[in-house]
Image (tube, rainbow, N blue to C red):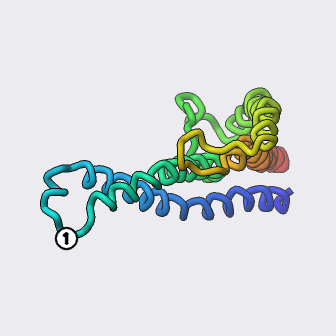
Amino acid sequence: MNKTIHFLEAVSEHSGRLVSWLVLLLVLLTLSVAIPRYLLSNEWFLSLNLLSLDWAGIRSSYSQYVNAMNDGIQYMHAIIFMFGLSYAMKAGDHVRIDILYRNMPPERQAWVNIIGMILLFYPTFIFIFIMSQGYVFNAWGILESSSRPGGLPWLYALKTLLLIMPVMMILQGTATLLKNIQILKNKEAA
């Protein structure tokens, strides 16, 4: 059981570490959109004629790529969120309303976790997976792209995260379920 738990948690761990680097890229891309937007729309800044550059040409060039950069920001945000969910669950950084839970002994916490997983967690993510299939397959069928002029063309690939995320959550949820079963077994053995 320990090997299974370790394997399932490794999926969440590696995906979380991998997408954590996207956060830095997301910040840099956001800055590369925001700063020029404010500078190139500020008439006072443009009147300074710094470095004798063709600011009108720079503004025109920027406007050609701004939609693709905005799509890139949205895509990265979605990737970070969808892949980061299972990592947050593994790390215990997810939201938990634990008014009563935190004062319970570990065995009772394990029972609450097991019942919650079976009654709420699994049905929720299985529902998301099933309901997203048609949406994702339709997007792939037409190779859906951004509706913005000059936007990124891979919207269909991004929508695939709606199938990957619940699978990753179910894998991590299974690791959590097995850990809680181990807590109960260890209590019985003691």
Q: Measuring from the top left, give residue 57's x and y in whole percent.
A: 33, 60
| 127 and 122: which is toward the camera | 127
Q: Residue at 55%, 32% (x, y): give it.
A: 98
Quadrant of the rendered structure where residue 114 is? top right
| 48 and 70: which is toward the camera | 48
Quadrant of the rendered structure where residue 148 is? top right
Q: Residue at 32%, 51% (x, y): give it.
A: 37
| 133 and 43: which is toward the camera | 43
| 75 and 41: which is toward the camera | 41
Q: What residue type is labelled 1?
A: Ser
- What secondary structure is found at the residue carrying circle 1? helix
Position of residue 38 relative to residue 10, above or below, is above
Residue that label 1 marks = 52
- The answer to whether residue 114 of the structure is visible from this angle is no
Residue closest to the far bottom: 51
Q: Report the quarter where the N terminus lies.
A: bottom right
Classify mark 1: residues with Cα within 10 Å, few (<14), some (14-19) or many (20+): few
- The answer to whether residue 156 of the structure is visible from this angle is yes
Is 35 on the left or on the right of 178, as rendered?
left
